[in-house]
Amino acid sequence: MKVYVDKKVAAKTTGLAEKLAALGEDNGHFVTIEWADYGKIRHQLGLPPVEFPKPVNKAAAPVLVHPPLPGLGTMAKNAAMAVAQTVIHSLTGNPLYVPEGVFNQRQTICRGCDEFLPDVRRCSICGCNCTNTWVGKMRLASQKCPSTPPKWDVWTPGT
Ligand code: SF4
């Protein structure tokens, strides 16, 4: 089974683009490569495993492959940081969650962002879930986008 790898996002991982170019087939914006070869490359580069993405429809393989999420250690560290920031934010009298309008704005920004991974609905920088979940950073007032500069910021009433 072949997959498509987005060249623009592959370029963000050191060495990935070169290895894809050696084993895959250039299709303009994407490199087409055997799923097994892609797994070998990921292993050689020490990247965390990814699940085989679901085909867009049953007859349609290959499918798109997006950049890797951060490693589990980084995601655990980010989650711990988010909890600490949320506690501090709440202790200073701020609400835990953003209003619905702010949540919708954040979600719209993420959906249009290059770092958003549609198949797993996560941010490729922090690995956080960018969907409608009450424990995800999108709803937490204490959280901001990890991009530099942030595309959306910490929310306090009146901002
Ligand atoms: S959190 Fe920021 S960088 Fe990540 S997908 Fe959303 S807008 Fe993009």
Image: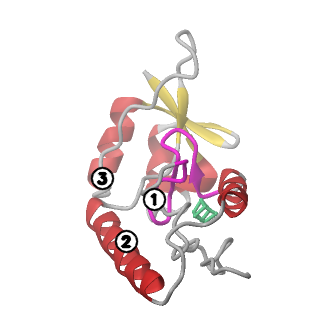
Which of the 4 quarters of the picture holds residue 69? bottom left
Q: Earlier in the sequence, mark 2 or mark 1?
A: 2
Q: Is residue 57 above or below residue 8?
A: above
Give the amino acid at mark 3. Answer: Pro
Residue 128, numbered circle: 1
- Position of residue 146 measured from the top left corner of the image (x, y, whole percent): 54, 73
Q: Badge 3: few (under 14), some or many (20 or more) residues near its Cα, within 10 Å?
A: few
Q: Residue at x 50, y 30 (%)?
A: 3
What range is drawn magenta here? 114-132
Q: Quick check: marks 2 and 1 in contact, CB under 8 Å?
A: yes
Q: Is mark 3 within 8 Å of ligand 1?
A: no
- Mark 1 Cβ and ligand 1 under 8 Å apart: yes
Q: Amino acid at mark 2?
A: Asn
Q: What amino acid is at disc 1?
A: Cys
Q: Nearer the viewer, residue 55 or 88?
A: 88
Badge 2: few (under 14), some or many (20 or more) residues near its Cα, within 10 Å? Answer: some
Residue 61 among magenta residues: no
Q: Which residue is mark 2?
A: 78
Q: Secondary structure at mark 2?
A: helix
Q: Which residue is mark 3?
A: 48
Residue at the image point whose x is 30% and y is 52% from the top: 48
Q: Secondary structure at mark 1?
A: loop
Q: Is residue 145 above or below residue 112?
A: below
Viewer-nearest residue: 43 or 77: 77
Tag 2 or tag 3, which sits nearer the N-term? 3
Helix, strand or loop for the magenta stretch, by majority: loop
Q: Residues within 10 Å of mark 1 (few under 14, many from 20)?
A: many
Q: Nearer the viewer, mark 1 or mark 3?
A: 1
Per the model, the C-alpha gap separating discs 2 and 1 is 8 Å
